[in-house]
Image (cartoon, rainbow, N blue to C red):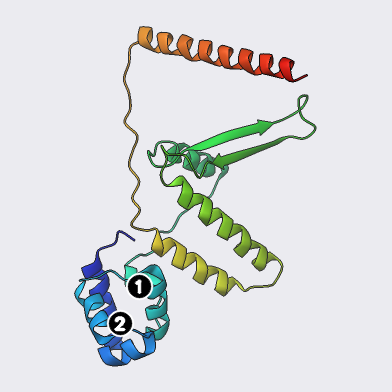
């Protein structure tokens, strides 16, 4: 989780005492050794998110409480707020999204989509986003088809957000270049794109 193990340990210890459980009692309920519980509480070892969830359930607290994560209030009151959010995402080094737009007359319908490539080596957090959206799709479907409750959805979301709360994002470095260099790079990119399109067309003709 990349969280601070000693801080997590302190929260486990405080929550255990609030629940009036000894380390031995917690160890028995968790199916761990007493020494393991002691290592958790001292910060010697960091419990996995699955263990955090199990401890939280036993101590009747939320996993977010043990990790030390508090979900910020995200205010989205207008369409411009949504647009600004995507612009801000585009400034982060660890995330990269592609934009697909389909509209007449080249397509029957009109749609746009944001795509995160999970195997993008230059955007290492894309894979985590892909896993999150896969789970969100399933959780949302269960909620909309009445197979789950809003409380269950919120509990799942809290665990997910707490788990990834320590995965910090950094700003992309802004490259400052002259207009001459910018034009040079633009021409090089356009030439490369033309060559790629030409090869694709040639390969298509050979396959016909």
The quarter of the displayed image where residue 108 is located: top right
The quarter of the displayed image where residue 68 is located: bottom left
Task: Decide which of 178, 119 is in the foreground and name it.
Answer: 119
Q: Are marks 2 and 1 in contact (CB under 8 Å)?
A: yes
User: Mark 1 Cα within 10 Å, few/some/many (few <14, many 20+)?
Assistant: some
Which quarter of the image is occupied by the C terminus? top right
Per the image, label 1 sits on a secondary structure element best described as helix
> Can you say whether 37 is above or below 171 in the image?
below
> Can you say whether 118 is above or below 31 in the image?
above
| Residue 132 rendering spot, x and y as whole percentages | 51, 56
> What residue is disc 2 on?
15
Residue at screen point 22% across, 77% down? 39
| Residue 21 rendering spot, x and y as whole percentages | 30, 92
Residue at screen point 56% across, 69% down? 153
Which quarter of the image is occupied by the N terminus? bottom left
Residue at screen point 25% across, 76% down? 40
| Residue 43 rendering spot, x and y as whole percentages | 21, 71
* 74 on left or right of 151: left
């Amino acid at each position: 989780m990349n969280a601070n193990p000693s801080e997590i340990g302190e929260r486990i210890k405080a929550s255990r005492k609030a629940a009036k459980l000894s380390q031995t009692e917690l160890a028995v309920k968790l199916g761990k050794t007493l020494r393991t519980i002691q290592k958790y509480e001292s910060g010697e070892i960091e419990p996995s998110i699955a263990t955090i969830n199990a401890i939280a359930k036993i101590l009747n607290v939320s996993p977010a409480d043990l990790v030390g994560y508090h979900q910020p209030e995200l205010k989205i009151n207008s369409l411009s707020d949504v647009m600004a959010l995507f612009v801000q995402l585009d400034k982060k080094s660890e995330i990269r999204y592609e934009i697909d737009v389909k509209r007449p007359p080249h397509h029957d319908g009109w749609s746009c989509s944001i795509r995160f490539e999970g195997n993008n080596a230059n955007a290492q957090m894309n894979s985590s986003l892909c896993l999150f959206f896969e789970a969100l799709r399933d959780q949302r479907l269960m909620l909309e088809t009445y197979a789950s409750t809003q409380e269950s959805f919120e509990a799942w979301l809290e665990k997910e957000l707490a788990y990834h709360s320590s995965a910090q994002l950094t700003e992309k470095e802004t490259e400052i270049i002259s207009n001459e260099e910018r034009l040079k790079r633009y021409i090089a990119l356009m030439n490369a794109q033309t060559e790629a399109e030409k090869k694709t067309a040639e390969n298509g003709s050979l396959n016909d």
